[in-house]
Image: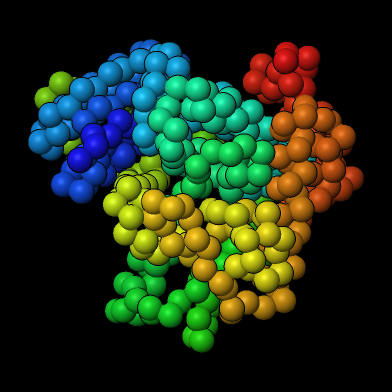
């Protein structure tokens, strides 16, 4: 059996112990013998990476594990590349959250103007990773991406590169788990339709929507909630990360600490490693992932990246037809997809014109505020937007 190499890009993330737990859980079916844990922040990488090494040893995975700051070295010979990057780290997220609130608009990491700015920073970096994968990784390597905004990144990679890639999120698996807990069973006939962080589980029974729909359906309420919170979610996460990193540095720690659950990302490793298992072992199991539509959702274009049930195997991704939906779902998905496409074009071209068009197209952005908001956001993130400021 061919041994596998995993490259984790952004391994200094506090989510990494959750991912490593997944590798241990799947050690019998996924023959990973080499790990390259890569991050541009050497200090964080040392803390998190050494905990990862202890986890792997404690879990019975006796394998080569390198901590590297060089991307090409990490990608060299990799079979599966796990992307979990945050361009600009948590301070950039905090700006994404705070600046839109000044305009009485949503500041959130993946949705609205905040998510848009994260896309502008992240898409070019992910595209560079896929380009380097072509040169250094195995020819049939897969990018398993969790970097947010996951859906927009998948829209870019799947339409502008030839990379094998799935966009993953823990929202679908958590939605299904919640429904099973609530009703005591899982409906095998369920359908899942949507975009990343804009999704519905449907069946002949009532609809269940992702909690991200609250941003659309209770917009003013969410704005007030964020303003009254005192701290943004990014500021809360920054404090939590400092606490977690102190725990991670304890050389006696060799398991994922319970406090990590407060950071979010529950069942992250389940979504990632179960998908990899289905691909590598050609199980052709059904998973909810972000993939090209290819006719599965009748009211979306074939090239649109949607988040739906797909069959995963060595031959790739096969989206399954969606039959249950309504006019509300159609309208909102088409509107947000128009925004996503413009956001990708803006990110790739460094086009302010398309960036403004994307913001105006977004259902959560007031058109009259879009231009001054964009100007302030671009300037605030100038360091991480070289294609907007003559850096490329």
The quadrant in which the N terminus is found is top left
Please name the residue shown 76% across and 59% down the image. Answer: 335
Q: Quadrant of residue 238?
A: top left
Q: Is residue 349 left or right of residue 283?
A: right
Please name the residue shown 71% across and 39% down the image. Answer: 344
Depth order, front residue of 337/238: 337
Residue 29 visible in rendering: yes
Q: How is the image coloured?
A: rainbow
Depth order, front residue of 59/212: 59
Q: Is residue 246 left or right of residue 324?
A: left
The x, y position of residue 337, in whole percent, is 71, 55
The answer to whether 170 is drawn above or below residue 88 in the figure is below
Q: Is residue 37 left or right of residue 347?
A: left
The answer to whether 193 is drawn above or below residue 33 in the figure is below
The x, y position of residue 33, in whole percent, is 21, 31
The x, y position of residue 276, in whole percent, is 35, 47
The x, y position of residue 260, in whole percent, is 31, 40
Please name the residue shown 48% across and 55% down the image. Answer: 317
């Amino acid at each position: 059996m061919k041994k596998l190499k995993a490259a984790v890009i952004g391994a200094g993330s506090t989510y990494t112990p959750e991912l490593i737990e997944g590798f241990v859980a799947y050690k019998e079916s996924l023959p990973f013998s080499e790990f390259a844990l890569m991050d541009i922040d050497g200090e964080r990488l040392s803390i998190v990476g050494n905990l990862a090494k202890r986890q792997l040893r404690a879990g019975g995975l006796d394998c080569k594990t390198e901590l590297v700051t060089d991307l090409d070295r990490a990608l060299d010979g990799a079979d599966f590349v796990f992307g979990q990057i945050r361009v600009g780290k948590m301070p950039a997220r905090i700006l994404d959250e705070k600046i839109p609130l000044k305009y009485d608009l949503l500041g959130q990491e993946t949705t609205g103007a905040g998510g848009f700015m994260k896309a502008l920073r992240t898409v070019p970096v992910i595209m560079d990773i896929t380009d380097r994968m072509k040169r250094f990784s195995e020819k049939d390597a897969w990018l398993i991406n969790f970097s947010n905004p996951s859906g927009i990144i998948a829209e870019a990679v799947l339409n502008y590169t030839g990379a094998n890639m799935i966009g993953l999120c823990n929202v679908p698996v958590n939605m299904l788990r919640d429904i099973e807990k609530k009703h005591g069973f899982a409906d095998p006939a369920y359908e899942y339709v949507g975009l990343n962080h804009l999704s519905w589980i449907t069946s002949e029974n009532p609809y269940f929507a992702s909690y991200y729909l609250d941003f659309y359906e209770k917009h003013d309420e969410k704005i007030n909630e964020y303003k009254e919170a005192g701290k943004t979610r990014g500021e809360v996460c920054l404090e939590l990360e400092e606490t977690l990193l102190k725990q991670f540095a304890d050389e006696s720690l060799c398991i994922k600490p319970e406090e990590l659950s407060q950071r979010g990302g529950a069942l992250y490793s389940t979504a990632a490693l179960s998908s990899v298992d289905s691909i590598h072992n050609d199980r052709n199991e059904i998973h909810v992932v972000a993939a090209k539509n290819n006719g599965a959702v009748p009211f979306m274009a074939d090239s649109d990246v949607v988040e739906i049930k797909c069959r995963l195997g060595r031959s790739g991704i096969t989206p399954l037809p969606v039959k249950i939906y309504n006019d509300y779902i159609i309208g909102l998905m088409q509107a947000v997809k128009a925004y996503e496409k413009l956001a990708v074009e803006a990110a790739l071209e460094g086009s302010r014109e398309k960036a403004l068009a994307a913001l105006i197209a977004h259902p959560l952005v007031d058109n009259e505020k879009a231009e001054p908001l964009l100007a302030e956001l671009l300037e605030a993130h100038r360091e991480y937007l070289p294609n907007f400021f003559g850096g490329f």
